[in-house]
Image: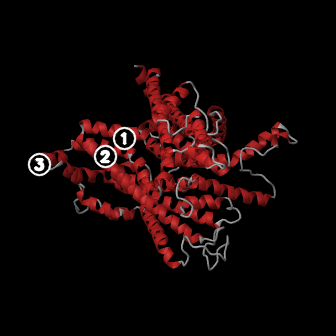
Amino acid sequence: MAAFLLRRLGNHVVLAVAATSLAYLLAAAALDPRANFEGRAPRPPESVVDARLTRLNLNDRTSLAVRYGTWAAGVLHGDFGRTWDGRPVNAELWRRLGVSVRLLSPGAFLGSALGILLGAYAAIRQGRAADRFITLGSYLLLAVPVFVLAVLLQIVAAKANDAMGMHVFAWVGETTPGAAHGTFGALGGLADRMRHLLLPTVTIAMTQAAFYSRYQRGLMLDVLHTDFVRTARAKGLRRRTALLRHGLRTALIPMTTYFAYSFGFLVLGGMFCEQAFGWHGMGEWLVEAISRGDVNVVAAISCLAACGVLSAGLASDVLHGVLDPRVRAGAAA
Amino acid sequence: MITGLAATTAPGRPAGAPAPGGPPRLPRRIARSRRAVAGLVLLAALFAVAFGGPLLSRWGWDDTDFAAFRQGPSARHWLGTTQSGRDVLALTLRGTRRSLLIGLSVAVLSTGLAGLVGTVAGFAGGRLDRVLMWATDLLLVLPSFLLVAVLAPQLGGGGLVPLLAALLWMVSARAVRGTTVSLREREYVLAARFLGASPARVIVRHVLPQLASLLVVDASVNVSVAVIAESGLSYLGFGVRPPDVSLGTLVAAGQGAAATCPWPFAAAAAMLVLIVLAVNLLGDGLRDVLDPAAGQGRGDR
């Protein structure tokens, strides 16, 4: 298993390096940071702009290969360079990553667990009302883009706030300023954070659950009619035990592949969520950086996203090994 | 379009001879699938509304009514007006036409490319196969969101369709290649080759019909991906430029005031959801009809 994972890791590192380099080259060739300075009034003299861009390694008059070399040397030392207005990318990158992780992780965990359970339940109750309801729901949800769903939930929450006559739901930003210094102190701050997290979490959880339940239902149906589940029942296991330990466990194995795939989905969905709920995370930063021609920021975010997607791939390999003893045995032999 | 394609491929199937008591012909089997029919009807209705609607309304999408700013539905403006006095119905229909056209053309282009590259690579084998598959893998590594977001504004309005198509064909090209490799050694394909048929003829007459179900389903998936991608890009500001509209920019413009003035947001969002829903229904229905093995044991679709 370890050798197998190491080989996969090596493969993934090569892919991550390739993806990041391509992202840098693409951004450096196509984006135009010079326009930021030329749009200023009064317009700075050209020599000043040139000197400034050169210092930031953003000058489009330096050849692309030279710029790439400078950038790659920096990245190898753990430095992603500077933004177009001269601040270091690294510090902001970690801060933004924290925001995005806080925004996405509750919804992702909740959504995948819920989706797997609902999908499996729908398969067990195949053709009954519960199955029809879950299938219809996932169908409708899959047709609703994240940015529409986010706004719909905001409308519902606004109506609920009005109906209850108090501000129960909050959805702009991460916190209400000053909430941590109110009557309840730090506890109030925590409650405020939870309140702000509620709607984004529901948005992400709903889309993830819809995605997972569709696949899980199909996989579970395939497993339900297999001989080993019948054998488990025949040897006297309770229906619940047979279905959970022999059915669901087996049906989860192919899901590990979708897990890596859905991570890319999650990153993209997070971008829309940040835009819709006003969180200042990585997605919002990427959109800003592309419109502003901030090459180093775009490259840094692409690097992190590539690493994220590839670690999700690696994690799905590990999960596969944990769930499927044949993989472990095959790798040990 | 899709029924037409299905109908022409039906006689090419080896078991397609209309034996008495045999399996019913393809159009009838499609007609029996509730999902496919619902999707087709919904899609046809959307096309009719999007392209026929402007004939009924006297407001163009770029007209401004200086007598009505941000109003609710009325006899004059059926779905109200936006903040700048433009007719919501006309704007929504403009966005719908755009989404439908982009969805269909991206699907045709990308699925066509997948079919072409996949069959040629699988059929030729050897060095050509390796080169084509290497290029396919390379494109898969590209950060696709970045590519579209950076290049789409620079290429202008017409660039989006080829760009999206160029990013969507890789996975299905691999699948097509895999199937082609196994088909290449089948008896009837070998027979055709030994009878002296040219590779192009063998691919078109004997390999492609076998791939029809894979390609049709792939195309339907690509339609919904392209529709969502276009509106998402426009929502983020990387798509159409301001005077022109897309469902994505309408959602983005409407969301701020959605609680007090829901019409612009609701109309665009509803159209977007209906398009994707129709295409998903049609795709799922077609998969069950064309590829029963994939749906086996998956219940009552």
| Image quadrant in which you'd find residue A137 | bottom right
Q: How far apart in space, not on screen, are marks 1 and 2 (Cα)? A: 9 Å
Picture coordinates of residue A181 (x, y %)?
85, 40
**What residue did someone put label 1 on?**
B136
Q: Amino acid at mark 1?
A: Thr
Say left or right for A94 vs B90.
Answer: right
Q: Nearer the viewer, residue A217 or B257?
A: B257
Q: Earlier in the sequence, mark 1 or mark 3?
A: 1
In the rendered structure, find residue B110 and report the number of the disc placed on it.
none
Whether B54 is drawn above or below B33: the answer is: below
Identify the residue at image location x=49%, y=29%: A69
Find out whether the residues at labels 1 and 2 contact each other: C-beta distance under 8 Å.
Answer: yes
SS class of the residue under badge 1?
Answer: helix
Q: Quadrant of the C terminus of chain B?
A: bottom left
Compare marks 1 and 2 and give the one earlier in the sequence.
2
Q: Which mark is residue B117?
A: 2
